[in-house]
Every structure is written in structure tokens, then in C-alpha cells.
Amino acid sequence: MAILGFLRDFPLHGYDLKNRVASLAGHVRPVADGTLYPTIKKLEDAQCLTRRTAPGSVAAPRHMLEITQTGTDQLRRWLRDPEPGFITDDNKWYVLLAFLHHLENPREQALVLARRREFLDQPAQLFFDATGAPIPPEQLDSPFRKGLMQIHRSTNLTEIDWLDRQIADLNRKAGYAVRQRGAS
Amino acid sequence: MAILGFLRDFPLHGYDLKNRVASLAGHVRPVADGTLYPTIKKLEDAQCLTRRTAPGSVAAPRHMLEITQTGTDQLRRWLRDPEPGFITDDNKWYVLLAFLHHLENPREQALVLARRREFLDQPAQLFFDATGAPIPPEQLDSPFRKGLMQIHRSTNLTEIDWLDRQIADLNRKAGYAVRQRGAS
DNA sequence: TCAATATACATCGGCTCCGAGGTTTAAAGA
DNA sequence: TCTTTAAACCTCGGAGCCGATGTATATTGA
């Protein structure tokens, strides 16, 4: 998703892509050559991108990669109907968020944000005692577990706040679009 | 790490472990049978845990798992000197945090928190333009990328705040310990 | 002039993990 | 009584990813 997402902005060669992906997701977990290049080849085989050789600006020749219509469609499908992990795993969610603007319909964008919002709403019950009964945060003896839950709750609230404002914004935009279509 | 961490609290059988791991890390990404049971076997082979069969309270017989001294040592090594991913990947970091109390020395605990603190300190530069120049957050045209960076910064500050208070606390504790040893 | 470095691409073995499928046991319901 | 459900465990094939290794090219600097 990150490869197609970046290529949707402008054509890039593999090495550049590697650095951009590394800056985004890789801040957390850098992407290895052995992952990137086979993936590029897979996307090429699937006709999601095309490559043409260009002289390297500094050294070896580059393969300039360009996204195709097929690739754009694929990217939009991934964004519109993301796999569960992209909603529940923060790392993946951030990657998705970084390219959500490529889904051009504000109503569809809002739907994706709503899925995340819904996920954040369910209260996290992380720890249980020997009998299986949930332990409330204030009864945890480990200060680290206490902090873990504090941080989790606080960051969730921050994101929920942003999500709600964003969803309202997008629905307003979608509403205008409908009214304009209705008026024309 | 989660398996040994949970077993350090009290003995459990595999099925129970599965639910607990799923509640912790699995809130994000549930753990599959095909992952859990081979891992238990690996830990048993490495003498990190022992198992004895007990009648199932509800149905099929259970394998009660108990952590050994070797397992405790291994757990402490993982906690004391975590792999980079456990510092930089939020999911893994939260798992580590959930069991950090099993590292009993407050000075060692503080050192781990300091590693996370150091990581959070480096400013995240996530996006670049076509020339490779970094794009400042306020110049991003995508509201999602803007929000992404806002949330990232805000949650980082929350965690940094907690980390600093916690590290100070732990060092105070370690200081008392030293003074007490010195006075005796 | 020659080595060292950085750019840029590629492959391969190995490891981890998942999901699908399967087994056994006991309780619950029809 | 018989089926269904849930608990509890296990295995295997395949997919994905990583790290090591290797190659070619241009610049830098000793």
C-alpha cells in the first residue's frame, strides 16, 4: 500500500521509495531490500506499476516506477475496504492514514475513519487475575501496567477527538457535494 | 515474552494463555493456534517452562504450564536488553511494558524506560516532496497527514511526560536502595 | 591513480507466523 | 439418546519478510 501510495504522488525509483517507506512505517520498522524489490516486482507483474530505466543522477541507473490505472484502482480498493489489521494495528493504521487522501470521495473517507472510531470505542480490558476476572486499572500493582493503561486511554481520547472533528468535516463536505449535484 | 511474562504471575494452560495474550497484544492482532502451541513447545524444549497434565475443568484435559528458573532468567534478559523493535514498535513496547515489573531492579527498569524516552525524542520526519526535501507539518495538503502528525506529536508528549515522572521515581527508589546499603 | 564510499538493484535461504483443518473430551439441548 | 457446542490441543503448508550476499556505477579523496 505504501509503495502505490507514494507512487500516486509522483514517479519514484526503488531506492527513493525505500527511504520514504522507511521514514513512514520504517521509523518503527525499516523495510529490507529483500522485501521491497520482490514486492515491486509483484506489483509490476500485477500491472499495478510500470518501470523504465533512467540514468542514475549519482551512480547506477535507476528504474523509474510509475503507477498505472490498475494500480490506482488497487490502491483505492485497499483504502476503501481495508483489512481488519489496518484498523486495529496502530502502525498499519498510520500508513493507511498517510494515503487516505487518495480515496477522493469524502463520504468513503469518512466511512474508513468511522471504522477506526468504532474500534477505539471498545474499552480495552488488558489484564485478568488467576480466576479470569478482569482487573480494573486502579487495582493493578505494577506501575508500568497502570501507566500503560493511562497512556492508552489518553492517546485514544486524543485520536477520537480528532476523528470526530474530521468525520463531521467530511460529512459536511459530502453534504455540500450532494446539494450541489441536486441543484445543478 | 508474553507467554513467559504471564506464566511468571501464575501457572496457566495454553488455552487460557491464548486468551490473555489475545487481550493484551491481540487486542491489536490476535495470536493464532499455529503460533501459540509451537511456541510453547519451543519454550518447553528450551527448558523455559514445564507442563503437567491436569483434568479439564470443563472439557478436554489441560496442560498446566509453569515457568522455570531458566525461563525466568530468559524473561529478565529479554526485558533488560530488549531488541530494537521492542523500543520502536508501539505494539511490542506495550507488551514489554506489561511485564517490566518482572525486572526487579528499579535501576534496570529506569534504563529501559530511558531507551524508549530517547527514541521518542527524535522528531519524526515522515513526508518529503519530489526533490527529497522534508515537508513541514503545516504545509501538508492532506488533512489526514496533518492529523497523523498532530496525533503522533500529542501522544508522544503524553508518553514522554509519564516516562519522565516514572524514571525520576525509579531513580529515587534506586537511590534509597543505595543509601540503605551504604548505611548498613 | 586507486581505493573507498554511496547509489541502486537483485536473489536466496531461512525463519516466523498464520489459517485451515483435525482430534479428543465433556456438557448442554433436542 | 443423539447431535451440537465449546474447551483444549496439535500439525502442516504456504505466505511474507528479513539479512546476507552479490553486482554495477559514479563520485570522492588520499
Image: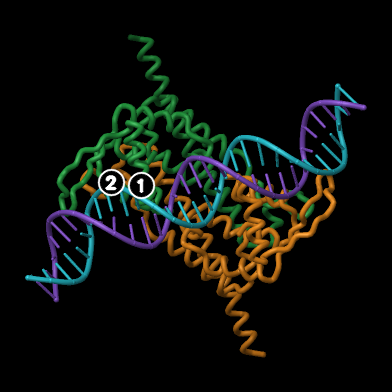
Chain colours: A green, B orange, C cyan, D purple
Question: Looking at the image, is A148 positioned above or below residue B142?
Answer: below
* Position in image of residue A79 (x %, y %): 43, 32
Residue at image location 44% in from the left, 29% down from the top: A80
Kindly identify the amino acid type of the residue bearing the numbered disc 2: Gly
Mark 1 — on which chain does it sit?
A
Q: Residues at badges 2 and 1 in contact (C-beta under 8 Å)? A: yes
In the picture, the quarter occupied by the N terminus of chain B is bottom right
How many badges with numbers are in the image?
2
Q: Which residue is mark 2?
A: A14
B170 and B92: which is toward the camera? B92
Determine the secondary structure under disc 2.
helix
Q: In this view of the protein, can residue B135 be seen by the observer?
A: no
Kindly identify the amino acid type of the residue bearing the numbered disc 1: Leu
Q: Is residue B148 left or right of residue B34?
A: left
Q: Is residue A59 left or right of residue D1?
A: left
B98 and A51: which is toward the camera? A51
* Position in image of residue B101 (x %, y %): 63, 65
Residue at image location 23% in from the left, 43% down from the top: A63
Q: Which residue is mark 1?
A: A36
Say whether mark 1 and mark 2 are on the same chain.
Answer: yes
**C-alpha separation, residue under disc 2 versus residue under disc 1:** 8 Å
**Residue B82, numbered circle:** none
